Image: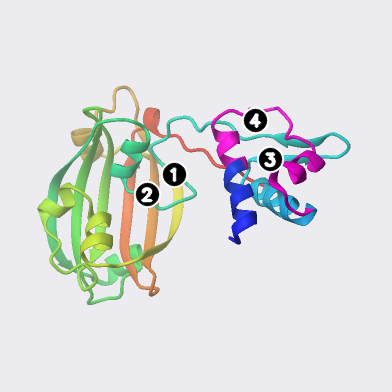
């Protein structure tokens, strides 16, 4: 962002998120903002347009610019970004731990290739992990990681944060993920590791994740207890 535009954007965003301009209120008039920020009309409009595209504002013809942003409720799954569960726990102010229940090296065969998208013959590390939030088992993850991209991956690293290991130790950029969300029947493995209560199905998020170089390094099937699965996003037509 250019200096002045970025300054206005950040200041308005901060005031919206801190409640200076609460939901369902209107921003000061365009003239007032131009005077307050000592800038051109186009600079103010550009900052407002960017905030509108991000779901903070909506222009109302003849009325002004309405604040539509509201603080996000707690959600352990982010649809719009690539976030580790450790980061999600911090965002939600919850305690978090991972239990690795299976860790093995595999070679992709035709069946696994069709399922995961990895090429036949590629070596992967398969991991099963139970994710605990505030000491409750919420998620059972089945991960396949490309061994050539993650040299030195261990069970201990998998107990903490594989993404942190990739970014901070290996210097790998995590760029893109493609997700599919379904509802599926509970399996015996789900019942073994998750406190399913009276539920007989789970929310399942399947994802393929790529490095900045375009290499698919991860295929994951993340099985969520239905009472703990919720996500929020802002959509525009």
Which residue in the protein does label 4 denote? Answer: 21
Residue 218, located in which quarter of the rendered image?
bottom left
Which residue in the protein does label 2 denote? Answer: 83
Label 3 vs 4, first from the N-terminus: 4
199 is higher (above) or lower (below) than 10:
above
Disc 1 crowd, CA 10 A, few/some/many (<14, 14-19, 20+)? some
What is the x, y in percent for residue 180? 45, 52
Which residue in the protein does label 3 denote? Answer: 57
**Left or right side of 26 for 73:** left
Q: Secondary structure at mark 3?
A: strand
| Magenta stretch contains residue 211 | no
Label 3 vs 2, first from the N-terminus: 3
Which residue in the protein does label 1 denote? Answer: 78
Q: Secondary structure at mark 4?
A: loop
Label 1 vs 3, first from the N-terminus: 3
User: Which residue occupies 66% across, 52% down?
Assistant: 50
> Which residues fall within the magenta stretch?
12-40
Q: Are marks 2 and 1 in contact (CB under 8 Å)?
A: yes
**Left or right side of 12 for 142:** left
């Amino acid at each position: 962002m250019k200096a002045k535009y970025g300054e206005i954007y950040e200041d308005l965003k901060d005031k919206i998120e801190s409640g200076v301009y609460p939901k369902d209120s209107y921003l000061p008039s365009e003239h007032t903002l131009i005077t307050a920020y000592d800038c051109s009309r186009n600079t103010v409009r550009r900052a407002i347009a960017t905030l509108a595209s991000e779901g903070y504002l909506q222009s109302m013809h003849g009325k002004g610019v309405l604040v539509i942003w509201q603080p996000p409720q707690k959600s352990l799954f982010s649809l719009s970004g690539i976030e580790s569960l450790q980061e999600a726990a911090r965002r939600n102010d919850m305690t978090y731990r991972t239990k690795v229940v299976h860790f093995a090296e595999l070679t992709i065969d035709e069946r696994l290739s069709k399922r995961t998208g990895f090429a036949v013959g590629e070596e992967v590390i398969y991991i099963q992990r139970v994710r605990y939030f505030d000491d409750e088992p919420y998620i059972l993850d089945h991960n396949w990681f490309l061994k050539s991209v993650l040299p030195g991956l261990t069970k201990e690293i998998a107990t903490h944060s594989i993404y942190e290991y990739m970014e901070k130790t290996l210097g790998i950029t995590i760029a893109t993920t493609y997700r599919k969300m379904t509802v599926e029947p509970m399996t015996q493995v789900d019942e073994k590791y998750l406190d399913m209560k009276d539920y007989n199905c789970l929310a399942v998020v399947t994802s393929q994740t790529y490095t900045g170089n375009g290499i698919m390094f991860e295929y994951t099937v993340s099985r969520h207890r239905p009472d703990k699965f919720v996500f929020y996003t802002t959509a525009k037509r």
